[in-house]
Image (cartoon, rainbow, N blue to C red):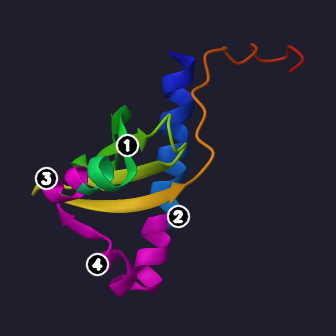
């Protein structure tokens, strides 16, 4: 549960950054969006990524985290209620974390 909450908080943080960037450069985000099926197909075919986590973001958008154990690539997307999916962030070095974070006040 804590792992999912951490992943979702990262996604929400990225969503906030992209929303701010979108206000400054609307064409950049528009170039990284497409129909959900096409985006999912590209993440699977080109990068071997599968969905690892998801959550409900602002404005009824769905945030999803995709990753590949083979290439260690990862992507975060948001999908609107109209089915438009946008790439929020992507990178390398994905590692699934199995250990829980320490409780508040305990050493790391």
Q: What is the distance, in whole Å, between disc 1 and disc 3 at their CAs?
A: 14 Å
Q: Pointer 4: what residue? A: 30
Q: Pointer 2: what residue? A: 17
Counting from the top left corner in percent of width and height, residue 45 is at 28, 51
Of badges 1 and 3, the one in the foreground is: 1
For this rendering, which residue is in front, 57 or 89?
A: 89
Which one is earlier in the sequence, the residue at label 2 or at label 1? 2
Which one is earlier in the sequence, the residue at label 2 or at label 3? 2
Query: Mark 4 falls on what kind of element?
Result: helix
Residue visible at 55% across and 22% down in the picture? 3
Q: Pointer 3: what residue? A: 37
Q: How crowded is mark 1: few (under 14 residues within 10 Å), some or many (20 or more)?
A: many
Of badges 2 and 1, the one in the foreground is: 1
Counting from the top left corner in percent of width and height, residue 30 is at 28, 78
Query: Mark 3 falls on what kind of element?
Result: helix
Determine whether, in the image, residue 70 is placed left or right of residue 85: right
Which one is earlier in the sequence, the residue at label 1 or at label 3? 3
Q: Residues within 10 Å of mark 4 (few under 14, many from 20)?
A: few
Q: Is residue 84 magenta?
A: no
Determine whether, in the image, residue 50 is placed left or right of residue 95: left
Of badges 4 and 3, the one in the foreground is: 3
Counting from the top left corner in percent of width and height, residue 104 is at 77, 18
Of badges 4 and 1, the one in the foreground is: 1
Q: Pointer 1: what residue? A: 49
Q: What is the distance, in whole Å, between disc 2 and disc 1 at their CAs?
A: 23 Å
Which one is earlier in the sequence, the residue at label 4 or at label 2? 2
User: In this picture, which residue range is highlighted in magenta?
Assistant: 18-41
Residue visible at 61% across and 16% down in the picture? 98
For this rendering, which residue is in front, 15 or 74?
A: 74
Q: What is the distance, in whole Å, between disc 4 and disc 1 at their CAs?
A: 22 Å
């Amino acid at each position: 549960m804590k792992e999912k909450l951490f992943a979702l908080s990262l996604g929400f943080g990225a969503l906030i950054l992209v929303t701010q960037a979108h206000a400054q450069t609307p064409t950049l985000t528009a170039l990284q969006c497409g129909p959900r099926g096409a985006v999912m197909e590209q993440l699977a075919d080109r990068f071997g990524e599968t969905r690892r986590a998801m959550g409900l973001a602002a404005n009824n958008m769905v945030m999803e985290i995709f990753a590949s154990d083979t290439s260690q690539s990862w992507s975060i997307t948001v999908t609107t209620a109209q089915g438009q999916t946008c790439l929020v962030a992507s990178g390398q070095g994905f590692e699934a974390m199995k250990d829980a974070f320490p409780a508040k006040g305990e050493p790391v």
